[in-house]
Amino acid sequence: MRPDHCAQRREPAFAAAFASGLLDPSRATPPDVVGPRGGAATKRYNVYRNNVMVSLTDALAAIYPAVQRITGVAFFRVMARFHIRATPPTSPLLFEYGRAFPAFIERYEQAQDMPWLADTARIERAWLDAYHAADAPPLSPDALGAIPADRLGDLVFELHPATRIVRSPYPAVAIFAMNRAAGPVTPLQSDAAEDALVTRPEMDVMVRHLPPGGATFLAHLIQGETLERAAAAAFAETSSFDLAANVAGMLEAGVFATIDIGDET
Amino acid sequence: MNAISHERDAGARGRLRFPGLPVAGLAGASFKHDHLDAILADRRQAMFFEVHAENYMGAGGPPHRALEQIRRDHPVSLHGVCMSIGGPQPLDRDHLDRFRALVARYEPALVSEHLAWSTHETTYFNDLLPVPYTEATLARVCEHIEAVQDAIGRSILLENPSTYVAFASSTMSETDFIRAIARHTGCGLLLDINNVFVSATNHDFAAIDYLADFPLSKVGEIHLAGHAEQRDDEGARLLIDSHDGPVADAVWKLYEIVISRCGPIPTLIEWDSRIPDWPVLRAEAAAAQAILDRSAAVHGASSNHAA
């Protein structure tokens, strides 16, 4: 019997054994885990199980407060528990957690009568990404004034690091805004589709809804296409696309960081 | 390509320079964003603030803005929560890089981590999980602490854990384990007296005996916090390290004993959940400061904080 050899074999195993039951209530308490004087430690091990589940559920609730307000706390915590067991975090940065939660909500049987809930969650996830995005001054609304009129169509925009778009066939922006605000929740007057624009020009995250064609216009700009081509794509989607109003609104919201005049050579 | 752009990267804006504020003899409090305005308005107190490193590992935004504001006026303690130093697997290199960048950016007066693990394979459990105390785990923990200290170019303070279970496979006491770590790695220690009290109750030993056996000369910071109470499998009291209330009287008593032996060691009031209004937390820190100040007077006024 060589004690050192035993210790070497045991060392990596303790974490695997301890971890195995943390998210799986069907597993027994690891045999190496004991209470005082070697006594039973199931309730004690359950403290860790509870800490893990409660803290991760709280993390999802902190990222998705509007979703929790809509579903109620009890519904949310059950839904979160299923998600955490299926998709636990893989990074110690919890503000990165929950990216798969909107898609999980979309499939979650008990949430099928709230088809707009997943898009509301997507806006909340985008909100947090914008909150933690790199700092950068947004492009000044005056910047376009310096561009010769005959070059405007060639402009290529670089996005501000915080900018996100969430497209929805539901009034997801109104649902998000009402459930993030302090006041009472009232029935919505509209069931119109709303595309969300999420920006953070300084320190405050802003969520507004994009006018018709705006999401397509911006998506093309994000892909590095020129202003002219992006506008053409938006007009192709909807004849009501208002180029001047979209550009002005986006500049005001701090969507862009820089502009480049396309190279003619 | 013609570029019309604003100066926009961090380099162009200039990295903030922070004053080298001393932390010796000071009490401090967990920094919570909800308290930012009250702290900035309340300019009279000399104290330090501790932050969980992981909350400042995003690229930018309000967390960094807030920490910059705090760091201008106060020493900061950077407290890592998820390095998983106690786990058997290698440290996450990306996480270590992020930790190094934070130390370089904020020049914290104190840097600490836990004797615990939180990641296994690819899963992050978001809890401080316990470690068996064996020669093999000792060697691994020492390797990990050396990796952290090599990465950041300075020594860290390692915090004693609060635990709810023990391991049948442990072959040494927690104090022997921690003493060996400090000797092998040169790290300092963060003595969490609430953790000592919680573990002593949970494992049926005397907190005062633990403290008598603890290498107090290596302690560079003390934590005080509140705990909650449950019952274990046999109906015995089981304390939970909940950080959600005021420091217990018994913990204050142990703290006074430690300070009377060691002198005025920087002391943090940890409060992470059910967070009170700022004046409540400030008063708890002021209670620790009063004990530190009495000790400083006795120990020859080595403390140099502003009154």
Image (cartoon, coloured by chain):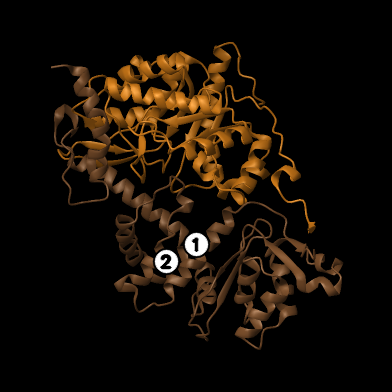
Residue B169, image x, y percentages: 20, 26
Residue B76, image x, y percentages: 59, 33
Q: What number is the disc on residue A125?
A: 1
Residue A212, image x, y percentages: 62, 82
- The chain containing the residue under callout 1 comes to A
Q: Quadrant of the C terminus of chain A?
A: bottom right
Q: Is residue A99 above or below residue B29?
A: below
For chain A, the rendered hue is brown
Residue B9, image x, y percentages: 71, 48
For chain B, the rendered hue is orange
Amino acid at the residue labelled 2: Pro
Residue that protrudes farthest toward the bottom in the picture: A239
Q: Residue at x 41, y 40 (%)?
A: B243
Whole-Å distance between the Cαs marked 2 and 1? 9 Å
- The chain containing the residue under callout 2 comes to A
**Residue that mark 2 sits on:** A102
Amino acid at the residue labelled 1: Arg
